């Protein structure tokens, strides 16, 4: 009986460790539908960097000396998007395995709305 309990606990811990977070699930879905070779994808790291609000966007615009009048009548605490760091390996168009480091934007429903390379 003890052996069955131990085996059950080990299986439960393995299964629970393999659960994807909602952010990881969204990125996995994007990889499956958008990558040329999704089978080559290997996640290195995924981390939420920031929650961008109107106030943070205005500050960013001010720091760059850009007009922010489109946000002037919006509530300062209004949610705009999340920024996510996504580092991974995948085959490029020529089949060579490359390491990529991207910043991904997600809306409140964790749908990917944009992505750009950290190198850009």
Image (spheres, rainbow, N blue to C red):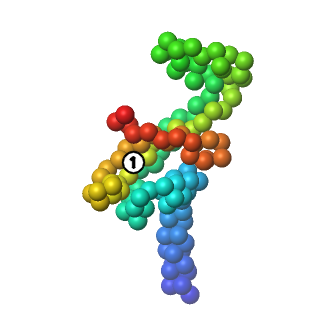
Residue furthest to the front in view is 94
- Which residue does the image show at 60% across and 47% down from the upper left? 111
Is 74 situated left or right of 105 in this image? right
- Which residue does the image show at 53% across and 18% down from the upper left? 61
Task: Name the foreground residue: 8 vs 29.
Answer: 29
Classify the position of the N terminus by image quarter.
bottom right
Q: Position of residue 16 (x, y in %)?
A: 54, 65
Q: Position of residue 41 (x, y in %)?
A: 39, 59
Q: Position of residue 45 (x, y in %)?
A: 41, 50
Q: Position of residue 70 (x, y in %)?
A: 65, 19
- Which residue does the image show at 57% across and 14% down from the upper left? 67
Classify the position of the C terminus by image quarter.
top left
Is residue 60 something that shows in the picture? yes
| Vertical arrangement, residue 30 with respect to residue 113, above or below | below
- Residue located beneath label 1 in the image: 87
Categorize mark 1 by other alpha carbons within 10 Å: few (<14), some (14-19), many (20+): some
| Vertical arrangement, residue 46 with respect to residue 71, above or below | below
| Vertical arrangement, residue 49 with respect to residue 77, above or below | below
- Which residue does the image show at 71% across and 22% down from the upper left? 74
| Vertical arrangement, residue 95 with respect to residue 76, above or below | below
């Amino acid at each position: 009986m003890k052996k069955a309990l131990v085996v059950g606990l080990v299986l439960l811990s393995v299964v629970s460790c393999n659960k994807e977070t909602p952010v990881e699930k969204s990125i996995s879905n994007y990889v499956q539908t958008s990558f040329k070779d999704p089978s080559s994808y290997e996640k290195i790291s995924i981390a939420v960097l920031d929650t961008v609000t109107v106030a943070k966007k205005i500050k960013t615009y001010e720091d760059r000396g850009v007009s922010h009048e489109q946000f002037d009548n919006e509530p300062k605490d209004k949610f705009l998007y999340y920024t996510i760091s996504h580092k991974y390996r995948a085959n490029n168009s020529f089949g060579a395995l490359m390491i990529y480091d991207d910043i991904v934007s997600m809306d409140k429903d964790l749908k990917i709305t944009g992505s750009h390379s950290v190198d850009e």
